[in-house]
Image: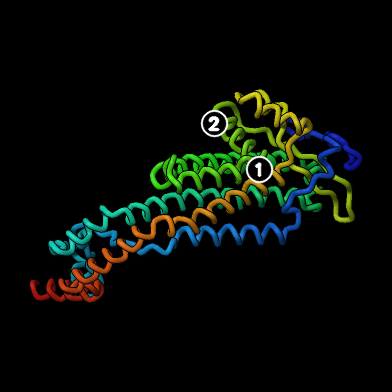
Amino acid sequence: MTQKPGGGKTVANRSGASLVQDSRLAAESSPFADLDERAAARSARLRVLRRMRRHNIPRSQSTSDLIRVRASGPLAAEWEHVEKTPVVEVEWPAAVKAARRRIDASLGAKLLADTAALARSYDAFLMADLELARDIDSFADPRSAWLHHPRHEEYLGRALQQLAHNLQNYVAAAGALIDHARRFRRRYAPAGTPNGNAYDQRIKATFGGPEGIIVEYLRNYALHHSLPLVVGQQQEVTAEGWPTLILLDTVSLLDGDGSAGEKELLKKWAGGIPMAPLIGMYSSRVVAFYSWLASRLRPWYREADQELEELNRDLQRALDDAGLGDLPSLIDQLEQRHRRER
């Protein structure tokens, strides 16, 4: 049953989950309460992602030892009667293969590959953040008040289930990014080194606050205990309707396995943990950390970067010497050769 909003009323959705009310939380606002600010934050996150993808380190050749060219154009038309279009295979010259092996064995190429892998995890986190932020923003819109009408309880339940699903994706992506970053750190900023000390200090300064502790607790709770219970609290009525404050149910979270310190932190929000400031602050800290990391990798590994640039130049020279510097021209030559052989 749904009561009139305002004044701290309690409502229930179709699943029977109580929508927690705490008057102290009603006054709390997200650092991204203004949608323009949240949009600007999203743009900043995507800019960091693009920086990590580029990283200003030259890419090595990612081809196999055989050039595999599928026939196209006029040659393919002549082979239409063949069940499968033939693949032309040409072995790389020895000088090219040797140059590629030197690139693959270099520290710069390994750093580039591992940076790209970490950027994929970062990308997945950003996408999960955008989906969850969209749902939280939708509930914060006063026009979402129609969901609380008794006839729309089914839609309210679905909306909360979708939000819970995106929360699960968010904490899973956050946890995966933490694990993948730890592997990256062991390889490129090992403990006891100047780089490792700088990395650890930045991690502590960035994620030592309550939002970092709570998000990691949520990840472990969702992985080993249950999906977090998401609840909504009606706010004050406006001319357009009333917004809904999205909360994490603290009582159910305290049933999870966690340290005494983590549970004491959760108890500070006995009436429920507001998701907007939690997710907004944590995501902003993630972006800040990876912006810092992207800015440090090049100075940390300047010599490896320079070595990789020189190795790529050696590879290009080997390709040019073998007449393979222009692959589109090579494809044309292969097609012409096969036409002559026919």
Q: Is residue 341 left or right of residue 206?
A: left
Occupied quadrant, residue 264: top right
The C terminus - image quarter: bottom left
Q: Is residue 222 above or below residue 342?
A: above
Q: Is residue 223 above or below residue 152?
A: above
What is the number of the mark on residue 70? none
Front-most of residues 261 and 158: 261
Residue 146 appears in the picture as rendered:
no
Mark 1 = which residue? 163
Mark whose residue sits in front, 2 or 1: 2
Mark 2 = which residue? 223
Q: Is residue 117 left or right of residue 134?
A: left
- Find residue 98 and report its horizontal and vertical position in percent: 17, 59
Q: Secondary structure at mark 2?
A: helix
Q: Is residue 55 above or below residue 25?
A: below
Residue 289 appears in the picture as rendered:
yes
Identify the residue at image location x=43%, y=44%.
193
| Amino acid at dot 1 | Leu
Mark 1 neighbour density, 10 Å: few (under 14) some (14–19) many (20 or more): many
Front-most of residues 194 and 62: 194
Identify the residue at image location x=84%, y=38%.
24
Identify the residue at image location x=58%, y=32%.
222
Q: Secondary structure at mark 1?
A: helix
The N terminus - image quarter: top right
Front-most of residues 295 and 341: 295
- Find residue 154 and report its horizontal and vertical position in percent: 73, 39
Instruction: Give how far apart the Cα atoms at labels 2 and 1 are.
Output: 17 Å
